[in-house]
Image: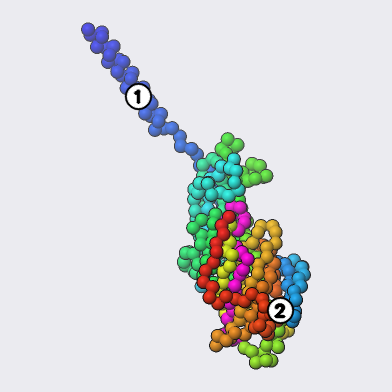
Amino acid sequence: MYKAHHKVIVLLWVFLGLLASCDRTIHEYPHPKKSQVIIEPHIDRNPPLYYKEVVYNEKWQRSEKNLESHPSSPYTLADGYSLRLIIDIYRCNPMRITPSMRQEQLVDRRVIELDKDAMPPQDTLHTYLNDGNYCILAWADYVRKGDLTDIYYSTNTLLNIHSNIHNYPPDRHLKSAAAGRQSFNLNMNLGPEGYPILPNSGVQTSRIVPVMLSRPMARYKIVASDYNTFVKEGGKLQGATVKVLYKQYVSVGYDVSIREPNEFLSTYRFETPVLNESTGQEGETVLVGDYLFTSFDKEDNIIADLCFFDANGKEISRCSNVEIPLKRNQETIVKGPFLTKKIDNGGQVAIDENFEGEHIVEI
């Protein structure tokens, strides 16, 4: 009887020892090791290159020519604005079929305020990540100083940035923005240091992942070639305004992951004060301009109606179906007698003053 009890006690101690060993093994099982990654954004601050010049003559005949790829005029923003940088880090499936990352997992988002004139690299962001495939999406735009909320672009997701078309800025250059993406891989099996691996670069010995950001949009400006004639006839641009109506599908959305516009309006309009900026050429003045999302590697074309009003609201001129070719990160100049053109537009389609809405097309 005593021997039987002794065997039971021994077996019980062995069982408890095994249980404790298992429990200790569970608690001491190592967590996946994370690697440090340093993200270094490089936001391009150079002005767009010249692209094309479109000229309308007095008979409203149109001609077009390519311009040499020299930098266009730089701009300086007034005080009170900052550069906002958004960094989204996605864990990616390298076997995904679609180019967009809408099905991927967002693992981190950083929103940073930078000086509006900061030069690249504008900052460094430190993070720690597990082994895997990743893609960084980056976006930079202008916001009010000390306030990182959206103004001219909605950025809830960088997979579908949206232009706030009902909030045209007091300075058109506030619509200038930059976007970029960079993929990389972390694999501790390739080295205990866990350095990020960039495409086509092999194993490196740096934790820095550079992200290059450039404009995903084109810039254009409308130039009056008849300014002297307009002034001689008694015209004044002080307090003048312009209504711009875009027609035939204009991009208002952008997906950073595919580097392409992803939402279009069949038509929309905005109203803004006439710029009346000198071009440096006698008898010319800049009337209005804008930034619009464009395709990654091909020319886009838009059609616009322009209607100019003096300080009292009296119509100065009306110009319909102005054709504007656009190329990403380049500037198009459109010249013509926009101020002295007859209001009777020869039967062309006029601006619909009662237009209130728009038609949205998503892709």
Q: Which mark is residue 19?
A: 1
Q: Inspect this view and state whether residue 40 appears.
A: no
Assign the C terminus to one quadrant of the image: bottom right
Q: Identify the residue at image location x=52%, y=69%.
A: 357
| Residue nearest the viewer, comparing 63 with 292 | 63
Front residue of this view, candidates 349 and 33:
349
* Point 73% across, 84% down: residue: 282
The part of the chain drawn in magenta is: 237-261
Residue 274 location, quadrant: bottom right
Quarter residue 358 falls in? bottom right
Q: Position of residue 350 (x, y in %)?
A: 62, 76
Q: Is residue 254 magenta?
A: yes
Q: Earlier in the sequence, mark 2 or mark 1?
A: 1
Q: Going 52% across and 66% down the picture, which residue do you hit? A: 164
Q: Is residue 7 above or below residue 20?
A: above
Q: Which residue is mark 2?
A: 336
| Residue 43 point in image, percent of width and height | 61, 60
Q: Residues within 10 Å of mark 2 (few under 14, many from 20)?
A: many
